[in-house]
Image (cartoon, rainbow, N blue to C red):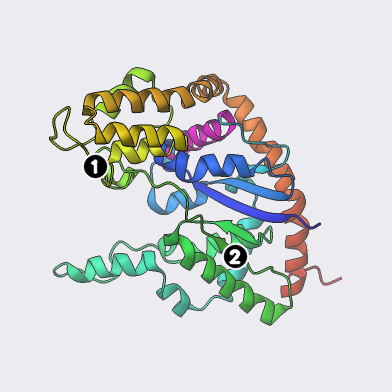
Amino acid sequence: MNKSTILTGITTTGTPHLGNYVGAIRPAIQASKDENASPFYFLADYHALIKCSEPEKVRQSSLEIAATWLALGLDTKNATFYRQSDVPEIMELTWMLTCVTAKGLMNRSHAYKAVVAENEAATNTAPDKGITMGLFSYPILMAADILIFNANKVPVGKDQIQHIEMARDIASRFNHIYGEHFTLPEAIIDDNASILSGLDGRKMSKSYNNTIPLFTPEKKLKKLINKIKTNSLEPGEAKDPTDCTLFSTYQAFASEHEVADIRQQYADGIAWGEMKKVLFEKINTEIIPARERYEALIQEPAHIEQQLQEGAEKARAISAPFLLELRKAVGIQKII
């Protein structure tokens, strides 16, 4: 049976938070253990340069993300775990794909159009102000990430579906010109994936500065949970779990039985302070073992680097010969 090739990239621009964990990292760690799949997970450090010009932040984020995934139990024997910049074939393929990609396709990118719309809404602002070619051609680099390994399944959020469709368009165009080389990738959407709210009730995001870092120390974790926004209902008053950040976060960590019990406690008027205590205990209990491994790994960057280099070696065993095939297809080869 042919294994499915599944690929996921993690942009190295911040510290992993609880929203990242329940929405992407936890299911990906589970998938890394699937012997019927060939998973690829990579630190997207070249992607990070599109929106971050702080070298130390990119470096530190790479360290923290790699340590996080390893601490949580990523199966690096079954999965290939590497840093994007350690696989040079990705960048060479990016140029090949750029040369067959229509500018009109890039004009339709949601990320590009969003910035243009913001500029047009501002007074005396050129439509393309602040837009770099990195932002404009970002979907081509993403296509190269996927196509270099002929990944046929790419788990993404709904906001990334367009980029997978673009990767398919780019691959189809290349195949039409140079012959069948690329598998057309499929976007995999998990409708059951948890999306956590942040401290202020909006989606947990670094952009909103409302996140709870995944491996923050216990005391800090408790303080952050105590800051989660609630309404003014008093203890003893029935509370509605709908649209409640405390309840939805608890639900992402608890069993069905535990959720049913808390739902009843809401109806019975549980105090917000008590609910925050329950939530802290639930999250902390799950995180403790991985937090301890994470803290140890952070002190051993050489071990993390070794894991990434071993992953890059596995990745290049696939990408290097494939890139030679693609070079030949486009006519870049020795004359004799």
Q: Is residue 242 left or right of residue 75?
A: left
Secondary structure of residue under mark 1: loop
Amino acid under label 2? Glu
Say if the magenta span includes residue 60.
yes
Is 292 a magenta residue?
A: no
Residues packed near mark 2 inside 10 Å, few (<14), some (14 to 19) or many (20 plus): some
Left/right placement of residue 151 relative to residue 161 reads: right
Q: SS at mark 2?
A: strand
Residue placed at 55% from the left, 43% from the top?
A: 27
Q: Quadrant of residue 70?
A: top right
Left or right of 259? Residue 163 is right
Between the residue at mark 2 and the residue at mark 1, the CA separation in whole angstroms equals 38 Å
Amino acid type of the residue tagged 1 in the rendering: Asp
Q: From the viewer's perspective, is residue 115 above or below residue 26?
A: below
- Quadrant where the N terminus is found in the figure: bottom right
Residue linked to disc 2: 186
Badge 1 crowding class, 10 Å Cα cut-off, few under 14, some 14 to 19, many 20 or more, is: few
On the question of residue 17 being in view, the answer is no
Find the magenta span and give its range: 57-71
Q: Foreground: 157 or 180?
A: 157
Task: Report which residue position mark 1 lands on.
Answer: 240
x, y percentage for residue 9? 54, 50
Taking the spot 34% from the left edge, 70% from the top edge, the residue there is 113
- Magenta span: chief secondary structure: helix
Placement of 231 over or under 291, stated as above or below: below
User: Residue visible at 53% across and 70% down?
Assistant: 165
Nearest the viewer among 199 and 326 is 199
Q: Position of residue 287 (x, y in %)?
A: 47, 26
